[in-house]
Amino acid sequence: MTGAGGDLHGRPTLAELVDAVLGYLRDDLADRVDGPERHRVRIAVHALEMVDRELRLGPEQARAHGARLAQLGFGSDAELARAIRAGEVDDGPALRRALTDDTADRLRVANPRWLPADPA
């Protein structure tokens, strides 16, 4: 993964490392274990899939989240949370849309299967 800092760490990249470990767990190890060990392998696979999704989606999601906060007039989640608790935020469509979009972005990383199917 390269960015403003260039390619400091070179290869393998974080994404390549995650992909290699996922491949080993899914393709090699999962079929050779059973019972509690198989369950632990599935948990490890799910965790690494989350890491993979966050590596791919996280930067854009962070940018979009910041833009949503700014549109609402806040600089951080903590500021927004304080204003909501104090009843200082208009509970209108803009807030609901921002919270819905943030929740959907979190689900895209945590478990995209929990998202409703797109009605396209």
Image: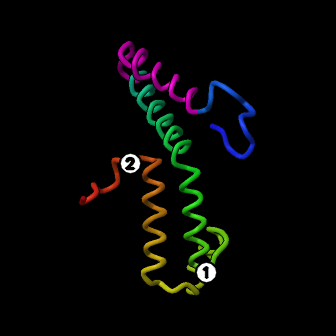
The one nearer the camera, 43 or 116, is 116
Residue 26, given in percent of the width and then of the height, sits at 41, 23
Mark toward the start of the polypeptide (1 vs 2): 1
Give above or below for 56 relative to 15. below
In the displayed image of the protein, which residue is found farthest to the left? 119
Residue drawn 60% across and 65% down?
Answer: 66
Label 1 and label 2: CA atoms lie apart by: 30 Å
Residue underneath mark 1 = 83
Q: Is residue 14 left or right of residue 120?
A: right
Mark 2 secondary-structure assignment: helix
- Residue 55 — which label? none
Residue 85, given in percent of the width and then of the height, sits at 57, 79
Residue drawn 45% across and 65% down?
Answer: 101
- Residue 112 — which label? 2
Give above or below for 8 relative to 33. below
The quarter of the picture where the C terminus appears is: bottom left
Mark 1 secondary-structure assignment: helix
Q: Residues within 10 Å of mark 2 (few under 14, many from 20)?
A: some
The quarter of the picture where the N terminus appears is: top right
Which span of residues is magenta-colored?
15-36
Q: Main secondary structure of the magenta part?
A: helix
Residue drawn 42% across and 59% down?
Answer: 104
Image quadrant in which you'd find residue 74: bottom right
Is 29 magenta? The answer is yes
